[in-house]
Image: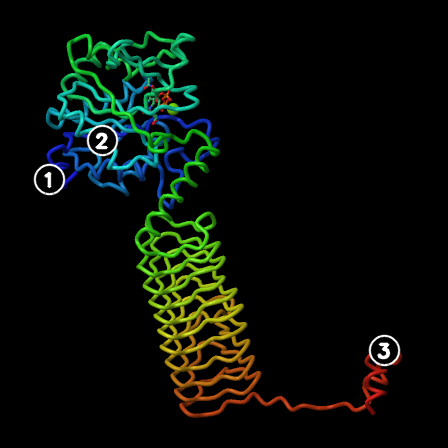
Amino acid sequence: MSPQDTNSFNPAAVIVLAAGAGTRMKSRLPKILHPIGGISMVGHALAAARGLNPERLAVVVRFERDQVAAHIAELDGTALIVDQDEIPGTGRAVQAALAALDAEGEVEGTVVVTYGDVPLLTTGLLEELTATHQTDNNAVTVLTAVLDDATGYGRILRHDADGTVLGIREHKDASDDEREIGEINSGIYAFDAKVLREALKKVTTDNTQGEMYLTDVLGLARHDGGRVAAVATTDRWQVEGANDRVQLATLGAEHNRRTVESWMRRGVTVIDPATTWIDSTVVLDEDVTLLPGTQLHGKTTVARDAVVGPDSTLTDVQIGEKAEVTRTHGSGAVIGAGAHVGPFTYLRPGTVLGADGKIGAFYETKNVTIGRGSKLSHLGYAGDAEIGEDTNIGCGNITANYDGVNKHRTVIGSGVRTGSHTVFVAPVTVGDGAFTGAGAIVRKDVPAGALTLTVAPQRNAEGWTAAHRPGSISAAAAAKSN
Ligand code: UD1
Ligand code: MG
């Protein structure tokens, strides 16, 4: 479908139903706020709906109303939030939304209804639904799928001879014969606004569940002479909802499988798709390689030819071209082009590693800017610090940035060489080209080009082992050597 075609099918409104309680999640967090691929389920629903370019968008809320409404407002400031009253059912929810939309100007044309808990639904499938609905001049078009196990779903009733859609029967209201039907109602529809408005006036709560069923609109529209039809999808994942945490995980895994596959098609090498998790919000360049056990979250970006993994979890981390990040846990960090991080490295927010730099094994960093080509190779902590270019920080160095009350900064210049086990007692500044000796405790500023030594004289007590550890392995070894 060309963009022009899709534009001509823009619906007048999309209504996202999100008032349900989600009891089976057994969670304090409202169901539709549970995330998949780094985005809440309702976030996915809003994105799919917005992709249709509807003139207006409404979301119906009720359960945990304030929390849900605040979340929706944050994601989509122009969505109209509609409260459902105590009358239950999908029909009542849509009626409330239509009334609220009508109050701002009567809706004319196509109204699409979707759910807030169907996270894999795409704009593409909604476009197909809307296009069929409008091209065929339907009163109602329902999105259906054929499932092996249709238990619990509303079933599509069709005319035996010509297959025309007659209506929908809820599972709880269905006869044994009707329960044999494998074609289910996804709960996603395109309606003509006028047909919807009129039919909803006639929908009652006279059924097993005592709810206003939106599904009753199909039979009513047909009765009034409207065309009712179905678009059947073969991609069942796109119509599946998450009702409990088992389904949440199943849908999450399928969502991830799709995300990973789409990146591979765009030129990313993924060695083990099953153990690679990529949020919807992550951006990768061509020729990035992801090794097994890599999880990329949030606004993480990875530039060309970089290699990430194995076993790395990165949230909001920007990785430059040709960088290598191995067995690293990081968040809120920037890794320059050609830089090396890991293995076993912990990058905390505010870490900025310059091009060709290195943060090596068993290093923790936080709020530190490291210049081009500088290396912190092994065993240490760098926090609240600024390090210049081409500086080499020796093994086991730490910035002592916290005095128990306040955090203080360490500033280290360019071309500096620090000895093993140097401690920088902040606030302190080390000038360009300075050296520190092994075990130096830098309490005072070091001028450019100086060598700093913390001189603690060494004393050897001869014969100490024989005197104080007689009969030990050490004493025997010493005796043999003397
Ligand atoms: C509904 C359909 C059923 C379909 C199934 C697909 C009806 C009567 N039945 O059944 O044919 O096969 O979805 O999943 O429509 N909601 C509200 N307000 C309410 C009730 C529900 O906003 O008063 C929202 C829920 O948050 C949810 C959606 O509507 O997003 C569906 O509600 P749910 O209770 O799951 O409907 P089902 O009984 O499963
Ligand atoms: Mg349901």
C-alpha distance separating marks 1 and 2: 25 Å
Residue named by callout 2: 58
Secondary structure of the residue carrying tag 1 is: helix
Quadrant containing the N terminus is top left
Count residues near mark 3 (Cα–Cα under 10 Å), then give few for <14, some for 14-19, many for 20+.
few
> Does residue 205 sit above or below 466 in this rendering?
above
Residue at 35% over, 70% down: 336
Q: Nearer the viewer, mark 3 or mark 1?
A: 1
Q: Earlier in the sequence, mark 3 or mark 1?
A: 1
Type of amino acid at the residue the image marks with label 1? Gln
Quick check: 352 left or right of 474?
Answer: left
Q: Secondary structure at mark 2?
A: strand
Determine the image quadrant of residue 52: top left
**Three-letter residue code for mark 3:** Ser
Callout 3–callout 1 Cβ contact below 8 Å: no
Between circles 1 and 2, the one closer to the viewer is: 1
Q: Tag 2: residue type?
A: Ala
